[in-house]
Image (cartoon, grey):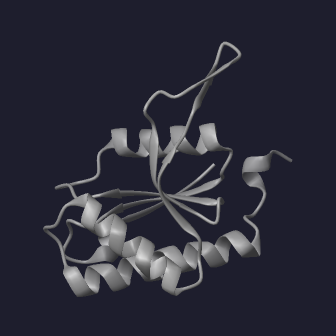
Amino acid sequence: MSKSFEPLSPETEEIARHVVDSAFAVHHNLGPGLLESVYEACVAHELQKRKQQAERQVQLPVLYDGLRLDAGLRLDLWVEKKVIVELKAVEALQPVHTAQLLTYLKLSGCRLGFLINFNVEKIKDGIKRVIL
């Protein structure tokens, strides 16, 4: 069986629940219309309140031709080194945003990521879960 068909671990699912709960809390308190950096700081704070280690703006190197290159890729949030969270504050999520998250998942070796757009009336409409 391929790795992509294996269920996520209970630990990863628990982290995912904390990510979604944190996004709901931030959106409930702030609503849409702010910069991504504001949402990033607030979601990181909510995750830390939930005893989750959330690293911000983590450099993600690219392995190319046997070299480890800093190509300027940065993860918005890396939760417990298991879940990547890419935050947006855009009119609508685009396919390029999903492609970006998929690339981050492949390069990091993580299987689960969230694309969260805060520029929505209801946050449930702005959360996209992506599994490799």
Q: Position of residue 104 (x, y in %)?
A: 53, 42
Side of 17 where 92 appears, left or right: left
Judged from this view, the residue extending furthest toward the top is 65
Residue occupying image coordinates x 44% and y 39%: 99
Q: How many marks?
A: 0
Residue occupying image coordinates x 59% and y 76%: 52
Can you say whether 85 is above or below 26 in the image? Answer: above
Residue occupying image coordinates x 28% and y 52%: 93
The answer to whether residue 46 shows anywhere in this view is yes
Residue occupying image coordinates x 54% and y 79%: 18
Decide which of 104, 98 is in the foreground and name it: 104
Q: Position of residue 123 (x, y in %)?
A: 30, 75
Side of 87 where 114 appears, left or right: right
Q: Position of residue 44 (x, y in %)?
A: 43, 71
| Res. 30 image quadrant | bottom left
Side of 31 where 85 appears, left or right: right
Can you say whether 93 is above or below 74 in the image? Answer: below
| Res. 13 image quadrant | bottom right
Side of 90 where 128 appears, left or right: right
Can you say whether 20 is above or below 109 in the image? Answer: below
| Res. 69 image quadrant | top right
Decide which of 92, 30 is in the foreground and name it: 30
The answer to whether residue 126 shows anywhere in this view is no
